[in-house]
């Protein structure tokens, strides 16, 4: 059935149920960013496969909202169906809430799947439409009713992340969580977010591609801790380890019954934005609710010393693999054609040679020329580009290791470049250096720091429609909060131990895309009478292609930073490479003014 056929079926169900507007977000019951195939219902109904977007369907209209990372991709993928693209945060396009305020009829009915819609998102809609007396129906998954060949949920064995990698036992983490619960006077702490659960119970799995999490729920009280999970994926050794840490198992579906049986004087701590509305409505109305960011999110975001040390090792492995790949690419392209897909697959093979590698941390973006202007481009066998001995090639990739999660982007020259390509590359590097080399007062948020990366580009009237940096999990989600570096307001202060990407870019549709990304950890820098100052310590060490640069555009300080960085790249990686690749890297990391 094509997309328009699916819309016809959905509208028939809407008419049968008396629903005026049906909304389908990119979500699962755990408010995950990346979804198991079973939960990709928004992609099913729209044909757009990007990771973020919201579909809205009425009798007459079909609308898709997505953000700036996906504008080009979305336009291409919905071109031949009824959906029309509404660009988020773009003048001339109403937001979802604005559209609803304008178009929802008085007393109308909005349908949505309460199993995947967060309680916070539902309350936002209710607040915006309060004067229209709109009713929300959240009991039915209409898209699930027309999805005949829906993939089954995965069942693969979970495993325990040992203390040599986690740095803290589950028992220690539970003790810290309970201390915070006591401060907030909470009797129950309910978790739906998979990365928080994985971190708290030191458990990892294979339920979501590239994200080593286990589909589950968790509940913590003063007396017990429960993991609600399909026990077919929990081996006896894992059950024993959890039990020894004070964690008992319950059936995945039983979470709602447990909530319904809470005593009326219970105080439940949860985050409405990360709990689905069906789960929320299972809690007795007499219970007191504390809506607060998950305790575990803040704890998880600040890495301990063991995690940081392991993360350093993960990046040395990862950058050795990436260096070997680029050496291979530059040799091979001299003699034959290479596609984006082949390059992506070859990089995977280099990573697989590294000890402790488990899987990619996200789908590799291997984008040549104009394709790199699509920030989240994914090459496909039947449509990918063939690399040529000219222009720019962008590779954004990462891995999941026992030592941690990696994410790194390099844009390299495959041959002769145009002056605009070199100019844009140099401007991106200037912003990259400006932020990584910064010193900032303790209490500063990423929202404040964001301008440092954009300033060299803004001076030239250039901007990129994405954030500058995001947190990175430890053998968990490649995108992690609570901190981020972006223009969007964010009051979370940067703290020592937070790991974050720095990835400014330039994206020119039909021409090229450029991004330079390193990962760094926030560190103590200095303390004066003015207060504590923090800075960044780089974790990722892979050469930055000097063939893409206009050296005259760099200041003496920027050249010094780049030369020092390249000296560290060579020293840290040389013993992990064979002689041929090592000599090639030595050439790639020579001082910027050396001819």
Image (tube, helix red, strand yellow):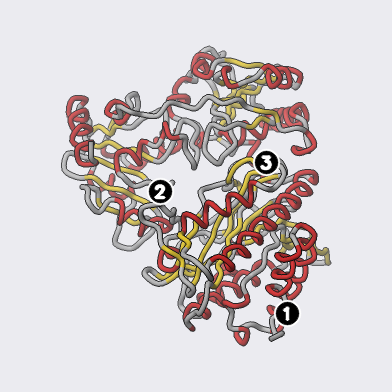
Quarter of the image where one finds residue 435: bottom right
The front one of 571 and 311 is: 571
Image quadrant containing the C terminus: bottom right
**Could you tell me how far apart the alpha carbons at marks 3 and 1 are, in whole angstroms?**
38 Å
- Give the number of the mark in front: 3 or 1: 1
Pick out the residue farthest to the front: 335
Q: What residue is drawn where x is 62% and y is 87%?
A: 552
**Residue 95 visible in rendering:** yes
| Earlier residue among tags 3 and 2 | 2
Q: Who's the residue at 73% across and 79% down the image?
A: 591
**What's the mark number on residue 302?**
none
Residue assigned mark 1: 591
Q: Residue at x 70, y 57 (%)?
A: 320
Please give the count of numbered marks on the rendered protein. Answer: 3
Q: In this view, does 179 lie above or below 229?
A: below
Q: Mark 2 points at which residue?
A: 50
In the image, 111 versus 3, the foreground residue is 3
CA gap, disc 2 and disc 1: 40 Å
Q: Is 359 displayed left or right of 124 in the figure? A: right
Judge whether 370 appears above or below 363 on screen. below
Compared to residue 135, the image places residue 525 above or below, namely below
Q: Is residue 483 visible to us here?
A: no
Going from N to C along the chain, the mark reached first, 3 or 1, is: 3
Q: Where is residue 302 in the image (x, y as percent from the top left)?
A: 71, 46
Dot in front, 2 or 1: 1
On screen, residue 180 versus residue 192, left or right, reads right
Image marks 3 and 1: residues in contact by CB distance under 8 Å: no
Task: For mark 1, give the secondary structure.
Answer: loop
């Amino acid at each position: 059935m094509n997309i328009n056929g699916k819309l016809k079926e959905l509208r028939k169900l809407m008419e049968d149920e008396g629903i005026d507007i049906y909304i389908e977000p990119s979500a699962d019951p755990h408010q995950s960013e990346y979804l198991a195939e079973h939960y990709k219902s928004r992609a099913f109904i729209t044909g757009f496969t990007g990771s973020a977007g919201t579909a809205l369907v009425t009798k007459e209209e079909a609308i898709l909202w997505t953000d700036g990372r996906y504008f080009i991709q979305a336009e291409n993928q919905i071109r031949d169906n009824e959906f029309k693209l509404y660009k988020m945060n773009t003048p001339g396009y109403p937001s979802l809430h604005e559209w609803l305020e304008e178009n929802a009829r008085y007393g109308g009915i909005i349908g949505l799947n309460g199993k995947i819609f967060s309680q916070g998102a539902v309350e936002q809609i209710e607040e915006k439409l309060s004067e229209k007396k709109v009713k929300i129906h959240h009991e039915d998954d209409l898209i699930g009713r027309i999805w005949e060949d829906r993939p089954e949920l995965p069942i693969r064995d979970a495993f325990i992340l040992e203390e040599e990698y986690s740095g803290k036992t589950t028992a220690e983490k539970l003790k810290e969580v309970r201390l915070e619960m006591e401060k907030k006077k909470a009797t129950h702490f309910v978790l739906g977010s998979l990365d928080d659960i994985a971190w708290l119970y030191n458990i990892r799995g294979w339920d979501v591609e590239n994200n080593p999490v286990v589909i589950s729920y968790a509940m913590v009280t003063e007396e017990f801790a429960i993991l609600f999970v399909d026990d077919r994926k929990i081996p006896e050794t894992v059950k024993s380890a959890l039990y020894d840490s004070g964690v008992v198992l319950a059936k995945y579906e039983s979470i709602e019954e447990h909530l319904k049986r809470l005593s009326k004087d219970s105080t439940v701590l949860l985050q409405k934005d990360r709990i689905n509305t069906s789960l929320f409505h299972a809690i007795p109305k007499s219970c007191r609710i504390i809506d607060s960011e998950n305790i575990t999110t803040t704890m998880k975001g600040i890495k301990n010393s063991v995690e940081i040390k392991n993360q350093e090792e993960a990046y040395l492995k990862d950058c050795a693999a990436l260096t070997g790949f680029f050496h291979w690419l530059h040799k091979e392209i001299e003699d034959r054609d290479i596609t984006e897909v082949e390059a992506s697959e070859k990089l995977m093979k280099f990573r697989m040679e590294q000890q402790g590698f488990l899987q990619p941390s996200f789908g590799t973006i291997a984008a040549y020329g104009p394709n790199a202007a699509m920030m989240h481009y994914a090459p496909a066998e039947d449509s990918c580009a063939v690399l040529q001995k000219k222009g720019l090639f962008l590779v954004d990739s990462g891995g999941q290791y026992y030592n941690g999660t990696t994410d790194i982007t390099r844009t390299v020259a495959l041959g002769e470049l145009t002056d605009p390509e070199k100019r844009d590359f140099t401007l991106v590097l200037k912003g990259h250096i400006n932020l990584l080399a910064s010193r900032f007062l303790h209490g500063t948020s990423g929202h404040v720091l964001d301008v440092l990366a954009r300033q060299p580009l803004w001076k030239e009237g250039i901007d990129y429609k994405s954030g500058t940096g995001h947190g990175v999990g430890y053998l968990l989600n490649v995108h992690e909060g609570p901190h981020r570096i972006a223009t969007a307001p964010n009051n979370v202060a940067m703290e020592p131990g937070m790991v974050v990407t720095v990835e400014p870019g330039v994206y020119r549709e039909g021409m090229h895309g450029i991004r330079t990304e390193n990962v760094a950890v926030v560190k103590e820098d200095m303390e004066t009478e003015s207060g504590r100052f923090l800075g960044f310590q780089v974790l990722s060490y892979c050469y930055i292609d000097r063939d893409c640069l206009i050296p005259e555009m760099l200041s003496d300080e920027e050249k010094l930073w780049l030369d020092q960085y390249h000296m560290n790249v060579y020293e840290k990686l040389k013993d992990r490479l064979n002689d041929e690749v090592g000599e090639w890297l030595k050439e790639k990391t020579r001082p910027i003014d050396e001819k």
